[in-house]
Amino acid sequence: MKFKSHIKKIKRVNYVNFSRLNFTRLDKNEKIDNFRKKIISNLKDKINSNLLASYPEVSKLINLISKNFNLSVKNILLTAGIDGALKIIIDALTEEKDKVVILDPTFAMTKIYCNLANLTILKVNYDKNLRLNNVKLIQNLKKRPKLVILSNPNSPTGTVIEKNYISEIIKITKKRNIPLVIDEAYYEFHGKSLINYLKKNKNLFILRTFSKAFGIAGVRVGYIISSKQNIQYLSKFKPMYEVNSIGIEIAKLILKNKKIVKEYVRNTLLSKKKLLNFLKQKNVDYKDTRANFVLIDKNKINKKIFNDCKKKNILISSKIFFNKFIRVTVGPQNEMRVFFNILKKNIN
C-alpha cells in the first residue's frame, strides 16, 4: 500500500484519553454554563425512533438561518462545523501546489486541510505584541494565490483585521477574482461581520458556527454563506448529509430561542471585563480579545495554576502563545468564581 508522501509532514493530536465533561472547561472556548432544563427537555421530546432511523432533514434549519440574516436559502450551505466548511472550500477551489494565504497562528484545521491538499501556504504572521503583519498580507495577495482564508476575529490571538486593511483585502481579491474566505466563528462576541459585502463581492465566502456563542460544539453544526452560484458549486463537494439529526434539532431550538445566545454573550462579555479590570489592578499584562477568551502574561502567573485548577475540576489551556501568553476561556461570572479565586492566589 502506498501512502501520499506529503502527508508524512502533517502532525495531528490524538483524542484526549480522559473525559472533559465533568470539568469547567476554560481551555477550548466552549460554552461553560448549562443549558436550561427546559431546552434539554424540549430536545428530548423531539428525539424519537423516526428521527434516529431516518436520514437528516435540513430544510427547516436552513430556512431558520435564512430568516435570521434575511438571505435566500440558496445562499446557505450547512456543514459539519467550520472545519467541515473549510474542507469543502479547499477541495472545491484548489489544486495541488496552488498558493493559499492564511494567518499564522490561526484555527488549527485551516493549516491541516491546506497541507492535506498539498497547497503552497503563504503565512501572514503576528509579532510578539499580536500585531498582524498587514504589509505582508497585502503583498501575499499580489502573489497570485488561488485562495485566501482569514479568521476574523482570529484564534488564538483574538484579534481582528483593521477596517482599512479589510477594505483593501476585499478590493484586491475582488479585482483579481481570488476566493476570499472569512471565518466568523466568534462573530457574536465581536458584533461585526462582512455579510453586507456579499452582494457586491461574488468571491466572498463567510463561515459561521453554532459551536461558540450558540454553545453546541458537541453536535458539529456550521454553515457557509456566499452567492447562489458559489453555494450551488460547493454543494457538489458536500457529503450526502451535512449534519446529523440531533444537531439539526438543537440548532433549530436555539435559533427559536435567541434570547439564550444574547444572554450568554452579554454575561460572558461582562465577566471578561471584570477579569481584565482585575488583571489591570494587579499589573498583569494581558491582551483583550474580540472573542470569549483572554490572553494572560505567563510570567506573572505561577506555574502551579494548572494543577490548582485541575484539583478544582477546571481545565485551562497549557499552550503558551508567542512564548508569553496563556489563553483562558471566559464565561458568565457564576461559572468563573472558582477560577478567579485560584488566579488571585497564583499571581506573582
Image: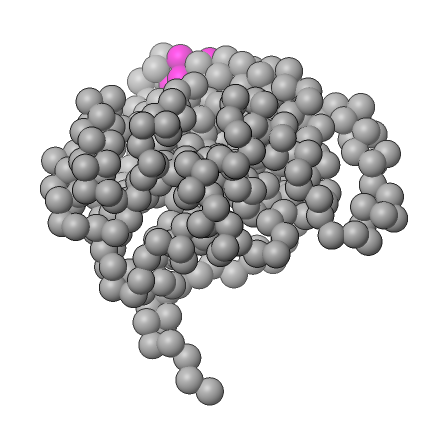
Q: Position of residue 238 (x, y in %)?
A: 53, 54
Q: Position of residue 81 (x, y in %)?
A: 53, 44
Report if residue 300 is visible in the image: no
Nearest the eye: 319 or 171 = 171
Q: Position of residue 71 (x, y in %)?
A: 51, 26
- Left or right: 168 with respect to 322? left
- The colouring scheme, among rainbow, by chain, secondary structure or one colour, is one colour
For residue 245, side relative to residue 148 (left or right): right
Which quarter shows the C terminus?
top left
- Closer to us: 294 or 159: 159
Q: Residue furthest front?
A: 229
Residue shown at the point (21%, 50%) measured from the top left: 145
Give the farthest residue toward the bottom.
1
Q: Number of marks in the image?
A: 0
Main secondary structure type of the part rendered in magenta: helix
Give the quadrant of residue 245: top right
The answer to which image quadrant residue 97 occupies is bottom left
Q: Which residues are magenta?
A: 274-279
